Amino acid sequence: MNNARYGHTASILFDGSVLVVGGSNSNGYLNTSELYNPSTGVWTLTRQFNVGREDHTASVLSNGQVLIVGGYNLNGAMVNVNLYDPLANIWTTGKRLNIAREDHRSVTLVNGAVLAIGGRNTVALSSSELYDPLTDTWTFTGSLNNARDDHTASVLNNGKVLVAGGMDVNVLKSAEIYDPSTNIWTLTGNLKMARSHYTATVLFNGNVLVVGGFGGSSALNSAELYDPSTGTWTLTGNLINARYGHSACILANGNILVVGGYDGTAYLKAAELYNRLSGTWTSIVERKITCYWRSESE
């Protein structure tokens, strides 16, 4: 990349390129963004947006534009929203959130709306908001049963949204489901282990794999599977290396690649591959691997 950055977002655009936005480094909070061309391996700076930030979210809309929501800078949690148009290579300012939020999660629903969930604004938030791309407006929707930040949010095959874990005052085990048809959050089965800063990946069979994370006192090496048909979590094979703050992606064969993170002592180079059929993890050596799509993380 042209700029070192932490706390940024990365989004796969419709043409296969990757848009990286914001974050921070030793120079402060960044209002820069870059495009990665996978066919050439080249990073190109795009236009700057108006306010630098980290710990925001990025959602690809049905029209191919990218919605940047909230985040954090020296002024605290943010209400700011920006839209990137890849065809025109320009940033515009969108309608602000109703509540400033950082470390929240955003997902694009089947109907094209964007759901911003929880986060932090001095304290953990239970509120959620819906963005309508046609009217550029935010509307409050149902509140979470548990306030949380640093959780994950996954759109299930049935269009509902699974939110699990994260933090309030303590690390959480609770999980809940959002139904877009009713705008109601309903508690579902608890995680086997409380965790934040982990990854969640929707598998080809519709189950959700959560991996690693921070358990409140140490990094976790455990992984769990959520079955939407029963609302229950089941432990699966343990990671070789405990880690949190890592990334994960699903491969074309349905297996899951987990990369990097922090084990509580050192930052990790180690990568592991989860076999969806055997439920086991294998260390892998560095080689070229193509992700089918990137998992939701944190």
Image (cartoon, rainbow, N blue to C red):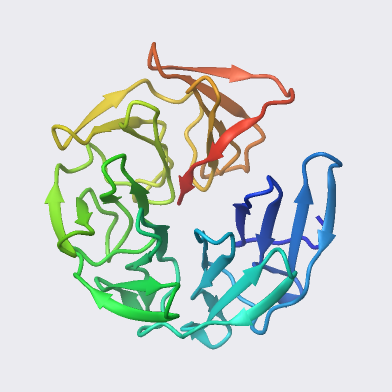
Q: Residue at x 22, y 56 (%)?
A: 178
The quarter of the displayed image where residue 138 is located: bottom left
Query: Residue 144 location, x and y as percent?
Result: 20, 65
Question: How far across and down, in percent of the image, does residue 175 sit?
Answer: 21, 50
- State which quadrant residue 283 falls in: top right
Q: Is residue 88 above or below residue 94?
A: above
Q: Residue at x 40, y 60 (%)?
A: 112
Q: How many marks?
A: 0
Pick the residue in front: 133 or 270: 133
Tell whether 225 sits left or right of 174: right
- Residue 69 rendering spot, x and y as whole percentages: 49, 72
What x and y, as percent, mark residue 291?
A: 61, 33
For the question of whether residue 30 can be seen, the reply is no
Q: Quadrant of residue 134?
A: bottom left
Query: Residue sitting at 34 percent across and 48 percent down?
Result: 155
Q: Is residue 272 visible?
A: yes
Along the viewing direction, whichever of 122 and 3 lies nearer the viewer: 3
Give the left or right position of residue 235, taking residue 219 as reference.
left
Residue at the outermost top position: 278
**Left or right, 283 with reference to 87:** left
Q: Check the image and report above or below for 239 versus 62.
A: above
Q: Nearer the viewer, residue 247 or 168?
A: 247
Seen in the picture, residue 277 relative to 115 is either above or below; the reply is: above
Which quarter of the rendered picture does the N terminus lie within? bottom right
Is 31 placed above or below 198 here?
Answer: below
Q: Residue, x 33% and y 71% (percent of image)?
A: 130
